[in-house]
């Protein structure tokens, strides 16, 4: 299967070999991802637990805010995952949605090391 992820953004950066992505000072980045409309879904994002400081950002699914994240140093050199529920009315009748991560002014969004949409965990 040929999977295409469409990336867009402003004031965004990436690490070596696209290992992470962030955006600064009201910057943003977005990806278009496939969805299934008949199941409750969630967005799962992967962060580095060493990222802290001024890292606050909003998370949108098709321009609807589904989350807010403030990263703080939690552990030593471990990747962590956070989940955000995607309301079913956002995906109804759609095959793809756009996930947008936008930094709060004066802050950094991310770094995001990975993201995926999956069935809602129980």
Image (spheres, helix red, strand yellow):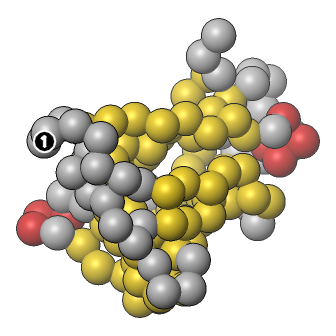
Does residue 109 lie above or below 106 as drawn?
A: above
Asked if residue 59 lies left or right of residue 86, the reply is left
Position of 12 relative to 94 (above/below): below
Question: Which element type, helix, strand or loop, lies under badge 1?
Answer: loop
Q: Residue 94 in the image: x percent, y percent?
A: 78, 46
- Percent position of residue 33, x then y: 56, 50
* Left or right: residue 116 compared with residue 47: right
- Identify the residue under disc 1: 77
The image position of residue 90, as x and y in percent, is 83, 47
State the residue at coordinates (55%, 35%).
83
**Which is more toward the observer, 52 or 109?**
52
Quadrant of the snapshot with the C terminus: top right
| Residue appearing at x 18%, y 58% in the figure | 19
Work out whether residue 105 can be spotted: yes
Report which quarter residue 107 is drawn in.
bottom left
Residue at 75%, 24% (x, y): give it.
40
Q: Position of residue 11 (x, y in %)?
A: 41, 89
Q: Decide which of 50, 115 is in the foreground and name it.
A: 50
Judge by depth and name the residue closer to the eye, 68 or 61.
Answer: 68
Please give left or right for residue 101 compared with residue 17 in the image: right
- In the picture, which quadrant includes the N terminus? top left
Seen as rendered, the residue at the extreme top is 122
Task: Please indicate whether residue 16 sits to the left or right of residue 68 in the image.
Answer: left
Q: How many marks?
A: 1
State the residue at coordinates (75%, 58%). 65
Residue 9 seen? no
Neighbour class for label 1 at 10 Å: few (<14), some, many (≥20)?
few
Looking at the image, is 104 positioned above or below residue 75?
Answer: below
């Amino acid at each position: 299967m040929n999977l295409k992820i469409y990336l867009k953004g402003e004031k965004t950066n990436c690490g070596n070999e696209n290992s992470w992505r962030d955006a600064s000072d009201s910057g943003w980045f977005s990806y278009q991802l496939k969805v299934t409309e008949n199941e409750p879904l969630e967005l799962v994002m992967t962060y580095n637990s060493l990222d802290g400081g001024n890292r606050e950002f909003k998370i949108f699914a098709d321009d609807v805010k589904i989350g807010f994240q403030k990263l703080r140093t939690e552990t030593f050199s471990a990747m962590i995952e956070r989940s955000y529920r995607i309301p079913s009315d956002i995906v109804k009748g759609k095959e793809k949605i756009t996930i947008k991560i936008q930094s709060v002014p004066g802050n950094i969004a991310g770094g995001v090391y990975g993201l995926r949409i999956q069935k809602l965990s129980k």
